[in-house]
Image (cartoon, rainbow, N blue to C red):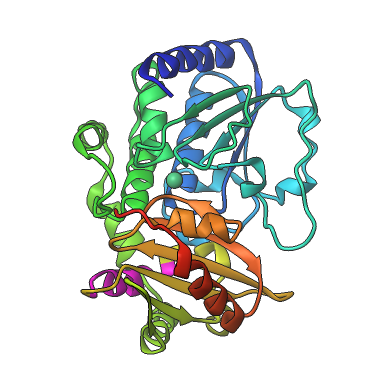
Amino acid sequence: MTKQQLEKTKKAILDRIDTLDNFAILVSDPDADAIGSGLAMEEILEQKGKKVQLYSSFEIPEYSFLPRSEKFVIKNTADLDFGQFQCLIFLDSSDPTRTLDKIGEQNIRIPKDVFVINIDHHNTSTMFGHLNYVVPRSTSTGELLFDIFGEHIQLTPSIATNLLCAIIGDTNCFKYPTYNYSHTFEVASILIQNGARHDFIVRNSFYSNTKNVIDMNIEALKNISYNKVGDITFTATVVDLKKYGITTSSSRRSFYNYYEIVQSIEGIDFSVRINPLTQGFLKISFRGRTTVVNSIAEHFGGGGHKAAAGGIIKSTPEKFISDLKNYLENAQLEKL
Ligand SMILES: [Mn+2]
């Protein structure tokens, strides 16, 4: 979207929110960006005197440190009657089904007369909203919420903390190499000036692991296989989260230490982590070190960002790795 289109969309979103009263906010499978953005959006609408419900299909105990986290109603979005709302705001969701726990046959039914606003930074967005504010070059949905609403609200310490947590989470502490951080650091600075606490977010996001999480990271690292197809070298590991009592929804955060180490291995182009789910499904998570990985994830029916992407597929770990190698034989991968 061009700068002019974004400005126009931003104004349309602000105008539309002014005219409506009854909102639901839906977030993608929860990471820090989805959760922090959801909480900030809920408070923004409350400030504007709106009726608002904030939903997650997944439990989010690992983000209970965030201010106002009790505002989340945990309910599978497949079971929601959206007809009771005038407007749905989807955050960080490249398509509406990203808000679902996708195992099994589920879908989202949105009545035609319900207005849909889509705010996201995935370049795989299906632009499903009546208004779409989609900026793939942006670090996070949290940063986009600041861009849209920052000048139109009172930036409370809780909004500032939730937005900064979203940005820190989606940039992996400003370490992903795929963004121009010039604007992001300006936003972060304003958030900190308005009461966001960097130390609180970092301690709770990255330095608060249980022993189970550490044991799982050790197993994931121990079991790494090194694979080479043509010029491409990648690591793969299979870990069963269930063994460690860790839910799929918190897995991204739980593997922080594993990713830090895998990303630091010289000569590796990308890594893939394979997590067997129930009913013969696998959750696959790619991290690019030198190559773009969302094109690989898309080949397997998933999506994501250039350096971090994934999806859920029906396969076995052995078959998936063999399919991945076959795909890489002829794939033209872009460099990060
Ligand atoms: Mn995000």
Q: Is residue 19 above or below residue 105?
A: above
Residue at 32 percent of width and 72 percent of height: 257
Where the N terminus falls, by quadrant?
top left
Q: Is residue 332 above or below residue 322?
A: above
Residue at 73 percent of width and 24 percent of height: 114
Residue 126 in percent (x, y) is at 59, 37
Q: Nearer the viewer, residue 273 or 119?
A: 273
Q: Quadrant of residue 318?
A: bottom right
Q: Can residue 64 be seen by looking at this rendering?
A: no
- Residue projecting furthest to the front: 330
Please state the extent of the stretch shown in magenta in the rendering.
254-265
Q: Nearer the viewer, residue 179 or 331?
A: 331
Q: Main secondary structure of the magenta part?
A: helix
Residue 37 in percent (x, y) is at 46, 39
Q: Is residue 179 magenta?
A: no
Q: Nearer the viewer, residue 284 or 167?
A: 284
Residue at 36 percent of width and 74 percent of height: 230
Q: Is residue 258 magenta?
A: yes
Q: Quadrant of residue 10?
A: top left
Q: Is residue 250 above or below residue 298?
A: below
Q: How many marks?
A: 0
Ligand 1 image-quadrant field: top left
Q: Is residue 194 above or below residue 286?
A: above
Q: Quadrant of residue 312?
A: bottom right
Residue 87 in percent (x, y) is at 67, 24
Residue 304 in percent (x, y) is at 48, 51
Residue at 71 percent of width and 76 percent of height: 280
Q: Can residue 77 be seen by looking at this rendering?
A: yes
